[in-house]
Image (spheres, coloured by chain):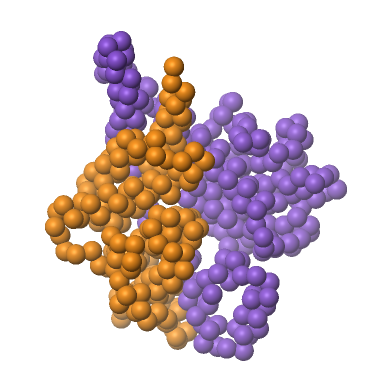
Chain colours: A orange, B purple
């Protein structure tokens, strides 16, 4: 008799319940529906194969997101596309990206412009961001705490905090430039 | 720090110092406005892509295949083959059942985890008041719906306050009540797009907490606490009274 079997079933059910947020991140990382579906399927297969490594009582959602992110990085390496910008595939972030100035909008008119941004412009601005910025914003929007984002990205909480701040600033700058 | 302030994560001393600075610094005050607008844009206007149903079915099928393939002794192989045939005969029903259970569990876990966040928060609720005339108007402009709640506390269930939080992927109004020394959380949110629990699924226990789900119009409600279930049902009756 094996007592692990019900746990696997429960984990499978819980993992399935995260299909929507996993697919959402995959869409923003890959930029298209077909690759996103493949990425989620591959991530799910990896998760099923390594449920034994998932610590009981751990954060399943963060664990799954980490698997998906690693699967994406592996795909990029396999496909030998353009190098991943901003340290997406490394614990150590790109110093240049981390040191980029935080872009802030100073005028009231610019704030008004920002308020009138529509969904399509926002999505396009997101897709134009470096992947490291895009993913930290998406994980934040997903409702992860900074500690959980750090767990997904494999970096320090302080790095998450500064990267998120810069990413949001870069997004505002993109939206501002887009509208000019 | 502005983002931490916006999210109520600063300690009281830091919060007071920052707010005092913001009152006298137009530049930082505009930066705060920019952060606020950025949050609203991301929360309300950034498109979210839902996984296609075909993908969900494929994932469910993969999960089942994995569960059967793990027991591949000769006997289990035969059972696995039978399961494969069964999969071909009634795949959709089985997969739908697995998906349905997963979705119901999502809402249950979400409700309990959100309640735990209320219990564990080390900063005061953004609006701390037992006065419904203070708490209900506070939500105006912070949500894209009006949280319809018939009961806003009395001596049996005094209202402690409220905040805007998230339930699954959407904003929620959180109202916090007390029952003696116990905390009761009520989450009100738009129910569209959620696989809504019904029957036994709408009244469940998990990790020692009772959760009651119900719907009224477009809104969904989740009531969570560790108080006696009968008392929770009593509170729900007050909340849903015509």
Looking at the image, residue A5 lies above or below residue B122 = above
Looking at the image, residue B74 lies above or below residue B238 = above
Please indicate whether residue A81 sits to the left or right of residue A120 in the image: left
Rendering coords of residue A51 (x, y %): 38, 36
Tell me if I can see residue B202 in this picture: yes
Numbered circles on residues, count = 0
Q: Nearer the viewer, residue B79 or B135?
A: B79
- Which residue corresponds to the image point at 33% horizontal and 68% vertical from the top-left? A93
Question: On the rendered image, what quadrant is the N terminus of chain A found in?
Answer: top left
- Which residue corresponds to the image point at 40% horizontal and 79% vertical from the top-left? A102
Farthest residue to the left: give it.
A80
Rendering coords of residue B130 (x, y %): 79, 57
Rendering coords of residue A116 (x, y %): 42, 72
Q: Nearer the viewer, residue B139 or B31?
A: B31
Looking at the image, residue A15 lies above or below residue B80 = below
- Which residue corresponds to the image point at 56% horizontal and 59% vertical from the top-left? B143
Tell me if I can see residue A168 in this picture: no
Looking at the image, residue A46 lies above or below residue B98 = below
Please indicate whether residue A15 sits to the left or right of residue B212 in the image: left
Q: Nearer the viewer, residue B152 or B60?
A: B60
Please indicate whether residue A27 sits to the left or right of residue A61 in the image: left
Farthest residue to the right: give it.
B155
- Which residue corresponds to the image point at 52% horizontal and 41% vertical from the top-left? A57
Rendering coords of residue A127 (x, y %): 28, 64
Question: On the rendered image, what quadrant is the C terminus of chain A found in?
Answer: bottom left
Quadrant assignment, res B145 = bottom right
Quadrant assignment, res A107 = bottom left
Please indicate whether residue B237 sits to the left or right of residue B202 in the image: right
């Amino acid at each position: 008799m094996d007592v692990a079997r019900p746990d696997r079933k429960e984990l499978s059910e819980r993992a399935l319940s995260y299909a929507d947020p996993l697919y959402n991140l995959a869409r923003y990382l890959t930029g298209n529906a077909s690759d996103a579906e493949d990425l989620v399927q591959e991530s799910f297969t990896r998760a099923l194969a390594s449920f034994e490594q998932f610590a009981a009582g751990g954060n399943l959602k963060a664990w799954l997101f980490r698997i998906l992110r690693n699967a994406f990085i592996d795909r990029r390496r396999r496909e030998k596309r353009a190098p991943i910008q901003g340290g997406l595939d490394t614990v150590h972030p790109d110093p240049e990206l981390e040191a980029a100035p935080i872009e802030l909008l100073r005028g009231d008119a610019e704030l008004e412009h920002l308020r009138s941004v529509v969904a399509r412009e926002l999505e396009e601005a997101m897709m134009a961001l470096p992947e490291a910025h895009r993913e930290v914003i998406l994980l934040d929007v997903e409702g992860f705490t900074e500690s959980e984002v750090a767990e997904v990205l494999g970096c320090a909480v302080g790095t998450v905090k500064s990267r998120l701040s810069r990413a949001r600033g870069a997004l505002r700058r993109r939206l501002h430039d887009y509208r000019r | 720090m502005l983002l931490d302030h916006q999210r109520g994560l600063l300690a009281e001393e830091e919060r007071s110092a920052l707010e005092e600075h913001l009152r006298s610094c137009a530049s930082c005050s505009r930066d705060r406005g920019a952060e606020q607008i950025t949050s609203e844009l991301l929360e309300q206007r950034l498109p979210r892509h839902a996984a296609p149903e075909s993908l969900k079915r494929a994932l469910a099928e993969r999960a089942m295949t994995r569960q059967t393939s793990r027991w591949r002794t000769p006997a289990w192989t035969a059972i696995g083959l039978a399961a494969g045939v069964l999969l071909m005969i009634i795949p959709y029903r089985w997969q739908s059942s697995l998906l349905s259970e997963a979705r119901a569990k999502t809402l249950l876990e979400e409700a309990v985890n959100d309640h735990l966040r209320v219990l564990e928060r080390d900063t005061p609720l953004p609006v701390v008041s037992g006065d419904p005339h203070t708490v209900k108007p506070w939500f105006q402009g912070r949500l894209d719906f009006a949280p319809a709640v018939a009961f806003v506390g009395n001596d049996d269930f005094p209202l402690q306050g409220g905040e805007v939080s998230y339930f699954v992927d959407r904003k929620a109004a959180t109202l916090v009540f007390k029952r003696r020394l116990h905390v009761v959380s009520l989450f009100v949110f738009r129910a569209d797009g959620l696989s809504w629990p019904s029957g036994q699924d709408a009244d469940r226990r998990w990790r020692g907490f009772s959760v009651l789900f119900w719907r009224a119009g477009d809104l969904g409600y989740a009531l969570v606490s560790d108080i006696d279930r009968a008392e929770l049902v009593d509170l729900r009756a007050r909340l849903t009274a015509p």
